[in-house]
Amino acid sequence: MRNINQIAIVSIVLITLLSCSNDKETNVDPGTITNPVEGGAANTTYKPAFEGQTRISGIQTNTPYEGVVIATTLTSPWGIKTLPDGRLLITEKTGTMRIATTAGVLSAPITGIPAVNPASQGGLLGLAIDPDFTTNRMIYWVFAEATNGGNNTAVAKGKLSADEKTIEGAAVIYRAKPANASTLHYGGRILFDKAGFLVVSTGERSVLETRPLAQSVTSGLGKVVRITKEGQPATGNPTFTGTGALPELYTIGHRNPQGLALNPVTNEIWLAEHGPRGGDEINRLKAGSNYGWPTITYGIEYSGEKVGAGIQQQDGLEQPVYYWDPVVSPSGMTFYTGNRVPEWQNNLFIGALSGMHIIRLAIKDNKVIGEERLLASENQRFRDVTQGNDGALYAVTDGGRLYKIDKK
């Protein structure tokens, strides 16, 4: 009996150790628990689908940290990514790119980029650095492209010249169709997944005539698409039912998705998208899934009317991991994989535009367990955030600032 008990105890210990080793999201204390950070009145009386889907408990970072402005002369920056040598490549909405050192020294504008339509929400948007950049120097970006038929969310690529003054051989590799005269809801983020394919978010262009296309499998609007470096549909993409379904589609049913990030624990793609009045969302993407817009939403029209039938849940349509009402306008985002601020490990950081802060979400078992609002006193519209090679976070704002956020 003693030997059996010993074996049982050892087995329990081993199972516990294995569980802990596989649960990297939960092995760090997220910080001091506080009341929910959202105290404003909601736009609706809609009920969440599960506990913790909105207005989760607040958390507070215990490690001393600071956000320091290191540059102030960017022109409407939209995307920021870290180059292999640790410097930062930044897109400016008007159609240029700049390189910044981690001390905030900015390069001259980089030329050779195809013309963008910067009107309203358009312009030069998100960017991605080729995983083989050290050998091929390739960059990929999303932009608003004006055509005879209207405006497109388009994807282009090009090579950063050796002197870093221009983009060589720039070429458009993908367009989300149909084009429309609207200058709103382009989406515009792009990243490389672990298989080396490009993942791109596109908006449904806002106007009532294109809004239903978020549900259409024959349109590239209101989608996440997965393509090769040449702009062709990626291998392994899901197959959507319906005549003429586009082979590049990865997920459908999005409104204006401006955030994409890879979860460092699961390698799954997470997405942030703008709702109307209420209903900003964080989604965990599952290939072939429908995220509901405009059939279901936790928001309402700007007029105060219901969106469609005014429903929030429907079989076959995915629920957001988390949503906000009132809105914060989530934009670019990144998971923190550094160790300089232990509480932040594997947390999701999101730039908030109308919210004017950086959102920190602690996540356990794919659910949000705490929310913190960083740099709210800066009164800035935070457009994008990335992690540097030095383990610090770097963020850009619509007002032209570049911030370094790090342990004091």
Image (spheres, rainbow, N blue to C red):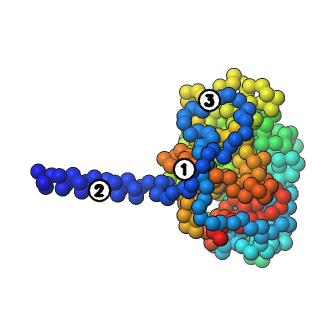
Q: Earlier in the sequence, mark 2 or mark 1?
A: 2
C-alpha span from label 2 to label 3 = 41 Å
As drawn, which residue projects farthest toward the top? 309
Residue type of the residue flagged with mark 1? Ile
Which image quarter: residue 358? bottom right
Residue type of the residue flagged with mark 2? Val
Q: Which residue is mark 2?
A: 13
Q: Which residue is mark 1?
A: 363
Q: Earlier in the sequence, mark 3 or mark 1?
A: 3
For the point 57% across and 32% down, the residue is 49
For the point 35% across and 56% down, the residue is 18
302 sits to left or right of 199: right
- The spot of residue 201 in percent (x, y) is 68, 47
> Residue 47: which numbered mark, if any?
3
Q: Earlier in the sequence, mark 2 or mark 3?
A: 2
C-alpha span from label 3 to label 1 = 21 Å
Q: Nearer the viewer, residue 279 or 55?
A: 55
For the point 77% across and 70% down, the residue is 70
